Amino acid sequence: MNKENENIETEELMKMAPTLFRMKKVNNLKAPKGYFSNLADTVKVRIDNEVPNGYFENLADKVIDKINKEETKVIPIQKRNIARIVSFAASIAAIFIIGFLLNQNNTEDTIASDDNYLENLTNRELDEAIDYNEMEELICYVDFEEDFNEALQIENSINDIYLDFTSDEIDEYLSSDYYLDVEY
Amino acid sequence: MQLSDEEIVTQIKSGKDSNQAFRALIEKYQERLYWHIRRMIIDHDDTDDVLQNVFVKTWKGLANFREDSNLYTWLYRIATNESITFINKKKKENNISIDNESYHLHAGQADYLMDCDEIQEKLEKALLTLPEKQRAVFHMKYYENMKYTQMSEVVGTSVGALKASYHIAVKKIEHYLIEN
């Protein structure tokens, strides 16, 4: 500010506020000792510890991406399902075989004792025989079909996530006992 | 050797020796900005907090700083806005009306006033009755002898409006001093 302007303003203040004009411009405030010598370092530390710009804008996307990646790696649960289905299928097959063998023995005995057994049965008796003796097996077969389809679906879903494996890992899995045991 | 404002801004923007340049900026302006804020806020700890915010904002905003405006007035503008924002926030937190003088005496300033002599105490109390922006204008003119054109850049108000604001502030203070 040049001297002329300063004088004008001083004169104006004298006219406007004579009490204020007569007062000394005193600063009664004090800064702590050494405050200014450390301020630059303090500010630097604060800046270094600031959350980077845009951090929160991308945070949700990053978390969702991470969750999606985690979800695609949940293979063990599906493997466990396959094992369960395979064991269930094996049990059903074992029941079939045992049932078939027992039934065959009975049939052979029956046929052996009476060669004209089937010829002597009426249509109604045949229907009843199917109803009572084979219906359960048929139901079991239908159930097994459902399990089989489910197993196929799971296998397909595993195919979908093959992308997450390396070719070495796939080869290792295909040559493993676990894979070789799985037959549909 | 002290760097010029242009050198400081150029170095920070270029990223080369930006830390040293920013340190130079802080060391160059810290005292002036401190007292500018301190006269508004009075309490040292609050002033320290606001001043650090000012420098953090300066660091973040320097990339967008237009060099056609003055670094000095730009820093003052940030400091003034931060101070006013701080005072208003404090008042809201304490549920005190914006024009209530009692806020200032609540916020640790009463201790400070005890250190002043009687006439200075009256002046400080008179200043505390002014609205924040008017107080900032009074400080810049009365204590810092800033030009109206510079103040205009800092406060974002026309020179005419600033002259009127200063005139009103002076009248209010004079009235307070006479009445009390």
Image (cartoon, coloured by chain):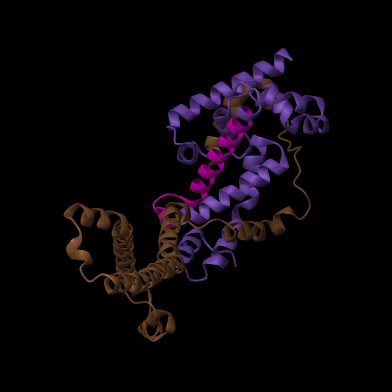
Q: Residue at x 62, y 44 (%)?
A: B50
The picture places residue B34, in percent across and down from the top left corner, at: 65, 46
Q: Relative to A162, is B47 on the left or the right?
A: right
Q: Note the chain letter of the brown one.
A: A
| Closer-to-camera residue (B147/B52) | B52
Residue A145 visible in image = yes
Residue B124 visible in image = no
The picture places residue A149, in percent across and down from the top left corner, at: 29, 63
| Closer-to-camera residue (B10/A182) | A182
The segment highlighted magenta reads B63-91
For residue B169, above or below residue B150: above
Q: Residue at x 71, y 15 (%)?
A: B178
Q: Relative to A121, is B29 on the left or the right?
A: right
Q: Residue at x 55, y 61 (%)?
A: B22
| Closer-to-camera residue (A182/B28) | A182
Label the magenta part by its dominant secondary structure: helix
Q: Relative to B46, is A132 on the left or the right?
A: left
Q: Residue at x 48, y 71 (%)?
A: B16
Q: Is A156 included in the stretch rendered in magenta? A: no
Residue A140: which quarter of the image? bottom left
Q: Relative to A67, is B29 on the left or the right?
A: right
Q: Is B85 included in the stretch rendered in magenta? A: yes
For residue A181, above or below residue B102: below
Q: Note the chain letter of the purple one.
A: B
Residue A14: which quarter of the image? top right
